[in-house]
Each structure stands twice: as structure tokens, then as C-alpha cells.
Amino acid sequence: MKNLIVLLITGITLVNCTNNSSDTGKVFCDTTCKSDSFTFTGTHRLKPFVSISVNNCVADSLVWSHDALLNQQQVEMTSFLVKEVRLHESAIKCFIKDTSYAWLSFNDCITGRGYLMKLPFSKSESINKMSSALNSFDKKFVVPDDLRAYADYSTIYIVDINTGSKEQMSFKEEFDINFDRVHEVIDSVNISRNRIYVELIKDGKKTPMEKTISL
């Protein structure tokens, strides 16, 4: 009887593990719960920084400032992004341009959705948020370190994070893109300073598009 009970408990445990695995499915990056903040600092003498705190495994408060500012700037991540995101150090980075602005790039570890934020240190300027970023954390998106890429339903946009220069390429039509499952439409991108190359999925087939640019 004792052996039978042990076998039954073992069987239940195995069933539960199997169910949890199938429910979770494939994720974009490690979802191990993190309690420490993600903090990035610049090289300017006024010590600009960007920091994201974590609460219950989810990105919580985003704060950025430098030593010459009386008050820090802050947003609540879940309300600002209109959804919860899980972060991992393998899919987040931040470029800080002296005391002018910072570019924060990250992907949600659950869906893989890419995000970009341009965070001005001046309170007179607005935050730029892109919830359809094509970040290079995704191996199918090749983007140089000093460029950022994002899209909407009909166009891909490229920006130089040092100069603010921009380029774009139209898809020639509008696509129904769910950016939580971006590869259903935008299979891959390969960006350089002189070319945008995109492979779109149209009618179940890959459709290449490219454009010469100058950045």
C-alpha cells in the first residue's frame, strides 16, 4: 500500500509538470524571477542613469535622471506600456547620450515583443515610445548597435541614436501585424547604414523588399 501511494504521488507530479510545460510554451528569453533593478549609467560627469525596478517578477518603475536635476523622472511600466513585461539581462540595453536623452531597448521575455523608448532628461520634452521595435535581441533582426528599428502596419523606420537622423521604407501595403507574434508577417530584417532589407510573409510565402538609404 505504501509503495502504491508513492507511485500515485509520483504520477500526479509528472502529470502536473507535463501540463505546466505545455501551458508555458516557448518563451523568448529566460523568465527566472528577478528582484534586483536593471540600472544603466552614462559616462558624463553629471552621472546620468536609467533604472527599472522589478516587482513580483514584472518590470515596475522606470526612473531616469542625472546630478543636475532636482527631481527624477519616473513612469510606471505596466500602465505606460498597457501590459506587464518580464525582462532579462540578455534582452535589454540602454544608450545614454550625455545629459540629452537615453534610448532604452528591451523585449518581453514571454511574447518576445520588442520595445523602444527615447527618454529625454529635459522635462519639457515628451517620451517617445515604440511598442513595435525590431530589436537585435531577436536573432532574425540584424540591426547595428548605433541604429534602432521599429515598424507599424505599413512601414519600417530606422533611426540613428547618436544624430537622430531617420530613414524609412514602405511595405507598399498595410498588413495586419500582431507584434506579439511579429514573425507571422515580418520574418526577418537586415539593416545597415546604406540598406534596409526585409522579408515579409505574404500569402504564406516570403516576399523580400529592400531600399538603399543613407545614414
Image: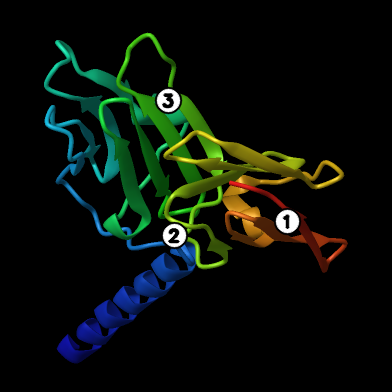
Where does residue 113 sit, x and y in percent of width and height? 51, 49
- Residue at 45% in and 31% down: 81
- The amino acid pointed to by label 1 is Val
From the image, which quarter does the N terminus lie in? bottom left
Three-letter amino acid code of the residue under disc 2? Phe
Q: Residue at coordinates 27% horizontally, 56% vertically from top-left?
A: 89
Please indicate whether residue 195 sits to the left or right of residue 127 in the image.
right
Crowd around label 3: few <14 · some 14–19 · many ≥20 (10 Å): few
The local crowd at label 2, few if under 14, some if 14 to 19, many if 20 or more residues have their Cα within 10 Å, is many
- Pointer 1 with pointer 3, Cβ within 8 A: no
Task: Choose the circle earlier in sequence order: 2 or 3.
Answer: 3
Image position of 12 with respect to 69: above or below: below
Q: Give the residue at mark 2.
A: 137
- To which residue does mark 3 refer? 80
Q: Nearer the viewer, residue 190 or 109?
A: 190
Q: What separation in Å lies between label 2 and label 3 (alpha carbons)? A: 22 Å
Above or below 24: residue 114: above
In-image side of 19 versus 75 (left or right): right
